[in-house]
Amino acid sequence: MKIAVLPGDGIGTEIVAEAVKVLNALDLKFELETALVGGAAFEAYGHPLPEATLKLAKEADAVLFGAVGDWKYDTLDRHLRPEQAILGLRKNLGLFANLRPAICYEQLVGASSLKAELIADLDILIIRELTGDIYFGQPRGRRIATDGHFPGAEEAFDTMRYSRPEIERIAHVAFQAARKRSKRVTSVDKANVLETFQFWKDVVTEVGRQYPDVALDHMYVDNAAMQLVRAPKKFDVVVTGNMFGDILSDEAAMLTGSIGMLPSASLNASNQGLFEPSHGSAPDIAGKGIANPLATILSAAMMLRYSLNQEAAAQRIEAAVKSVLAQGLRTADIFSPGTTQVSTLEMGAAVVAAL
């Protein structure tokens, strides 16, 4: 099982190191190879996604990714900014399905900003289409300067588009996932305003007819955003486009108490995947040893489940995380009175010990 390890920037190096320790604690044989990506790669090679890193990712069975980005790179030409690395990996690996579970652990109910009764036993799976929509539409606006800004321009635009095959394949992922859960899918769109999402709604409905055992309902994105904080447990599997999925999955993250708890998987048609925490590089806390590694450790569990066919090992990691939380150990982002605050290293060591 060959894994490309791409720590990236900021806290990426700290949290990925703990996930690697957890993987090495399993009785499995991995071939782990580390490479630079993002700002770190730009500093070394002048590009956020060097050819050697991309080659490694393509040849691997899975990619364990940390995070990229730093404010100091905001003045770079857009195509050289660290965030272009993740976009390039998605495009070159054909990663079209982003799976983001939002699970509220029993021990963290008090860490959520919502009332306990609203989020107790919360378990949502948001499936975001990852390679289409407005993020990959036609070039943005008029008079595009080399730095990605528009000095003197009077308008700018982005093109939202989807093709039938793109919608069909993400819909199949959602319905197949629902069959393993509660057999309910909510498709989120803006069909009342956007032709693109009327098309989305029509195609998802057509695909849904192939899954008569799965209930399908449709919801406008503004209502979905409201319902996520009003009655989040009414959702099970949510499928939506790239931009809406980007926003809603981050909103759902905060239902769990901290985005530091949320893993994610991005898969292609062969189930080769990139696995990363849902949070960013957090340069403001990098190097302080206070970042929460649990989202990355849980991403490693998703990697074992979806790309490496090691379900038992994935469950072992998830059980170890629950055990550590039950012991009352908390990083700063999920700390509350009566619990014990630990560092990034200590949290990783506790998960290894629990294994």
Image (tube, helix red, strand yellow):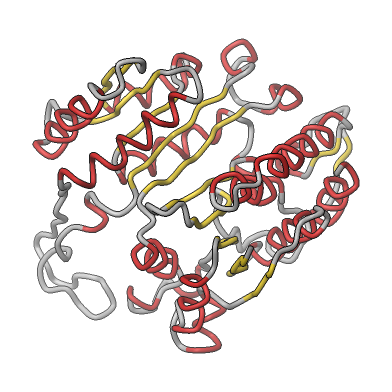
Closer to the camera, 167 or 147? 167
The N terminus sits in image quarter: bottom right
Residue 171 sits in quarter: top left
Q: Provide residue 289's location: percent of width, then percent of height.
A: 78, 59
Q: Provide residue 108's location: percent of width, then percent of height.
A: 72, 27
Counting labels gives 0
* Identity of the residue drawn at 36% across and 18% down: 214
Residue 138 sits in quarter: bottom left
Q: Provide residue 165's location: percent of width, then percent of height.
A: 20, 46
Closer to the camera, 76 or 236? 236
In this rendering, the answer to whether 164 lies above or below 1 is above
* Identity of the residue drawn at 34% across and 50% down: 130
Residue 22 sits in quarter: bottom right
Say whether residue 202 is left or right of residue 167: left
The C terminus sits in image quarter: top right
Say whether residue 84 is left or right of residue 202: right
In this rendering, the answer to whether 352 lies above or below 80 is above
Say whether residue 40 is left or right of residue 210: right
Residue found at the very far bottom of the displayed protein: 45
In this rendering, the answer to whether 111 lies above or below 70 is above
* Identity of the residue drawn at 50% across and 40% down: 100
Closer to the camera, 194 or 235? 235
